[in-house]
Image: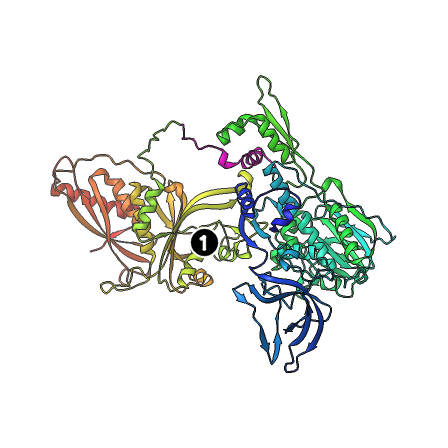
Amino acid sequence: MKFNKNWLDEYVENNLSAQEVSDMITMAGLEVDSISPVAGCFDNVVVAEVLTCEDHPDSDHLHVTTVDCGESAPLQIVCGAKNCCKGLKVALAKIGATLPGDFKIKPAKLRGVESAGMLCSYKELGMAEESDGIIELPCDAPVGMSLREYLSLEDNTIEVDLTSNRPDCLSIRGIAREVGVLLSTDVKDVQVKTVEATIDDKFAVNVESFDDCPRYLCRVIKGVNQHATSPVWMTEKLRRCGIRSVSPIVDVTNYVMLELGQPLHSFDLDRLHGAITVRRGREDEKLTLLSGDEVELDANTLIIADDNGPLALAGIFGGLNSGINDNTCNVLLESAFFSPLAIKGRARHYGLNTDASHRFERGVDCEIQTLAMERATELLIAIAGGQAGEIVSCQRAHNIHDSHKVSLRRSRLDRVLGKVIDNDTVMNILKRLGLNPEFIKGATDAEDTFVTTCPSFRFDIAIEEDLIEEVARIYGYNNIENAPINNTLLMVERKESSLPLRRVRDELVALGYTEAITYSFTDPKVLNALGFDKGIKLCDPISPELSTMRETLLAGLAIAAKYNLNRQQKRIRLFETGLRYIADESAENGVRQEPMLALLCCGDVFSESWSVQSRQIDYYDVKGDFESLLDLTANKSSYSFVPTKAAYLHPGQGADIVLDGKVVGSLGIVHPQVQKELGFKSHVGVIEIELAALASRIVPVFSEISKFPSIRRDFAFVVSKEVRASDLSAAIVSELGSIVSDVNIFDVFEGESLGEDKRSIALSVTLQDKERTLEDGTVDELSQKIIALAEKSFAATLRS
């Protein structure tokens, strides 16, 4: 939002500089982005009148003019502007003038013709980025008067970066209201006269959904002189707020929007057919915008239409076929209150960003539509003439924002601010904000309470904390003294049986992984490729690529990995901790949020080195990284792996992670088809597990080292390929008990000599008794038990 200091001064009397105003409103929550002068640094530029304008004898684009600048004799000026003509009031930089950029005006000879000055454009005076020709001043501009004085250029433009909850300040009226509150001074309101109807013309209006448009006003104005000139006071205010003057009709609607905060739209009355209808678009409809671009409409887009079809995107942008042009003399003026939900996101959907949509999607005051209509009518008739009909109104009261009450407890205010502000000051602040406060003294068991009634222009005040914020910012954050924290420091016991997340992160970093933080909402195409198609859709996404809440953290990691691979990163190791979101009707708000840990790796296993041969990652690399995490739990034996059911994993190189009989995660190599859909050219390894499954660990217990030697026995069993080596190892430990100190798989062999569905698993069993030395007979007996167990439980045969 841009506004100029002089315009603000018309509403609020103050002796502050632009910098002081900016500092004050910034500290009150309206952050000022920039302060800039409305014109560049120049002097000796005056108002002049072109007396004659003839073609240059030796140039096809220059003009030789004589101008009256209030001196005893006219001056001869050579000018190249196309809009230069006899009778025009212009800005003349006389000999000796200094223009922005330290450009000095000297006598010159252009193509053999002397020139005693320069006719200036807005750009040359630092008043605009671009300009089509020289400045055209009003006919009544006094010749010889300093341009800086005539246009009151000792002024500054202040640009405020408003947060989305403060649409009430998207107008000079709103800014003035805020400054008045901060200065505890009265604010002059806009004086608007009611324009009586002088013609009987009306235009029928039909609103199909009052939820989308609770109030729609329109008015016929006939006989408008579109070729009239907008007054300089209006065009200058528009320019200083960043809006270019176009025509009286457009200038008036823009001016009222900046003044009151109500966007208006004007239709060429003679190009309308039948009644105005406010409705949703239809799938087969198209609309050509004022910019010339054609857009396809849909059922989510609110439009203004007549009997022939769409006329405009409601609250966003007008249509070309009903827009104002140079021949327009009869106007239908629109002033409406569109629901923010009906407009929000629609401008972005069509690649538009307009002043109207910026205001409507945040919310405009629902009580100023009539005021804005009367103000625009008054200004338009005063500038361009015409006759107005009655205002036609179509509205439904119960759809319009009602003033609601919000209470503020005295004790809550004191507790949050950490400072006691007396009741009179709080009441004064709330009153200045237009909240009509009432102080209710609490009874024995009740608290003292301020009860406020929110005005129609403050959409953002809904709960007690909003009122606390208002009191704090108006009272002044700088006026709330710093105080040391007065609290008891409690030492929280950290249980050894819990595994801190920080320790898990440190371990992953030690393994070469980098922590990533991705959006909680992600691309539905990536989710679908991974086999997740029940994601929660966002109503108003930032973009189509961020439109679904993630069901898996792997989606964000896959996007991040692809991004890095496209930037010549050959070895990717990423991990992330965060929530996944699962639709669940039994959960709060219908969404189950689960803390997860996800890892993704792709590319080479090792960084490039002369001593290590490069290779791609495989299943065992992924599983090894996960087992490093299991080592942190000191409870590795409680976890087991079963063939995966995850569709995104390779069926032969994936496993589900099981803890206490429950599947808590998955790991492995991504399925080749999924890998292709995601755009990866090499193997991708992934792990995803519930964080709760890694949240605890077994506390180490001292165990005395045995004084007696250990004995190792090796076995090679031929078993079915369906038998898992981990099951065989676990069975041996279970059968022999604590005498087994270690079981290690050291070889797996498959070949024709064993049979098509057979494999050989070679394992070493380390035996050690803490009480005595194991004799050969005892070891042989234990070995036979192992062989018998393998034969009975796994149909194994001892390989010779």
Residue 705 sits in which quadrant? top left
Does residue 753 lie above or below 412 as drawn?
A: below
Of the pair 289 and 101, the residue shown nearer to us: 101
The quadrant in which the C terminus is found is: bottom left
Whole-percent x, y for residue 341 in the image: 64, 48
- Give the left or right position of residue 326, taking residue 437 as reference: right
Q: Is residue 263 visible?
A: no
- Give the left or right position of residue 328, taking residue 241 as reference: right
* 477 drawn magenta: yes
Of the pair 96 and 562, the residue shown nearer to us: 96
* 645 drawn magenta: no
For the magenta stretch, what is the residue range? 461-486
Of the pair 268 and 349, the residue shown nearer to us: 268
Q: Residue furthest top?
A: 444
Q: Residue furthest right?
A: 200
Whole-percent x, y for residue 2 in the image: 60, 52
Residue 224 sits in which quadrant? bottom right
- Give the left or right position of residue 352, taking residue 580 as reference: right
- Please tell me how many numbered marks the rendered image carries: 1
Does residue 757 lie above or below 170 as drawn?
A: below
Dot 1: few (<14), some (14–19), or many (≥20) neighbours within 10 Å?
A: many
Residue annotated with mark 1: 556
